Image (cartoon, rainbow, N blue to C red):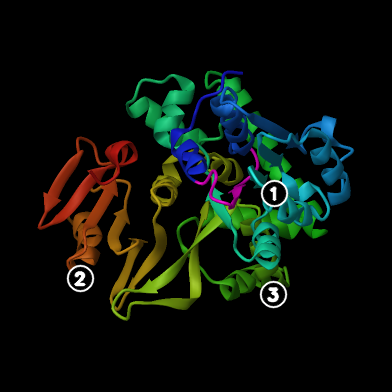
Amino acid sequence: MQLITRQHYADKVDAWIGKGQIIVLTGQRRVGKSFILKDFVERHKNEPQTNFIYINKERKTFDAIKTHEQLNVYIDEHIMEDAHNFILIDEVQEIEGWEKSVRNYRLEDDTDIIITGSNSKMLSSELSTLIGGRYQEIYIQSLSYQEFILFHGLEEGDDALLKYINYGGLPGLKQIGLDDEELVWDYIKGVYHTVVLKDIVERNSIRNMALLNTLLRYFADTTGKLCSLNNISKLMKSQGQDVAVKSISSYLSYLKDAYLLSTADRYDIHGKKLLESNEKLYFGDIGIRNLIAGGEREGDIEKIVENIVFQQLLRMGYTVNVGQLRAGEVDFVCTKSNERIYVQAAYLIASKETENREFGSLENIQDNYPKYVISMTPFVRRSDRQGIIHLGLREFLKHGFH
């Protein structure tokens, strides 16, 4: 299979080489972490005095490496003196005690370590405890719209956007192609079941699969809405299921640890502080969300647009929160360094009432930070209403806010 460089991530990885930091590629399974490692090798293999030690725990070749002692033996057998050694370990969490090896080899001269993992809690807690923060995490997401077009050789336009909205951005779809819809959904279903089985059920010894499936369907149906665990518990009780809030909280944390879901906390715009209760939930890949929700997209396109905008804002490097106003809510408060941007996401601005609602919430914010409405309204690329910019979704996905 032809390797396609995802330049955004290639640049990030390269920037940390030689800095004494462990590079950690995190993200949901099947979003392309392994191919970013392979691409790294391809881009650097012809450099003089380099040696690559590549261990992929998803390949049976490396089944025998189960503990950090066995990992040490393998690395010692393949490490080269008088060369710059790159130690690459894919799905490192499959090796017991892996963090001990990583800590030791980080201290070796002329050695860089890049690891991947599919469990955020395990990676962050183990690395923080053992190496005191001497690592750089790079969150790998499924394909952006621009990458989706590149991978599938599509002509940019409404048809390409609709395919992206429907199928999402799992890189492995490149091998499947987009012509046979049944095959596409079979592939997405396979990825979904692998993530659920390996990174949620097995890792957390889950027995109540009915509750897990109910929650996943609930989160797919309520994407982009404020999530109250108490309300979920009450809803389930009304349907004859007595589920404690603590259990729902645990299952939600498992879904987030596996990168299946991401959250946006509430932010009090007037008080300029994070609020503790409630959050919005978004799926890491919109295709998986659509698979769980089932049906056609017409009834939930608003949720999908908001999910896609949220994930794109993360790609752009923003910390994303939900904006809470005294009189309402703003979809996203986006911060990066000293920069702040407010964003409303909508499907269509087709009536004066909708326009007043979407633009009005931004007009209620009394500061001078940039404000945007992003929608799929036909013929809108970029317009201005009293200083608030209206961007077409395609324009935003192609060019950001510029």
Is residue 28 in the magenta section? yes
| 113 lies above or below 84 | below
| Circle 1 residue | 108
Q: Mark 1: few, some, or many residues within 10 Å (few <14, many ≥20)?
A: few
Q: Nearer the viewer, residue 159 or 70?
A: 70
Determine if residue 350 is in view: no
The disc at residue 202 is none
Q: Quadrant of residue 122?
A: bottom right
Name the kind of residue labelled 2 in the image.
Asn
Q: Is residue 294 left or right of residue 346?
A: right
Image quarter of the C terminus: top left
Determine which residue is flagged by label 2: 364
- Answer left or right for 286 relative to 207: left
Crowding around mark 2 (Cα neighbors within 10 Å: few <14, some 14 to 19, many 20+) is: few
Residue at the spot 73% in from the left edge and 36% down from the top edge? 81
The residue labelled by disc 3 is 246
Q: Residue at x 60, y 69 (%)?
A: 232
Closer-to-camera residue (223/274): 274
**Mark sitting earlier along the chain (2/3):** 3
Q: CA distance from mark 2 to mark 3?
A: 37 Å
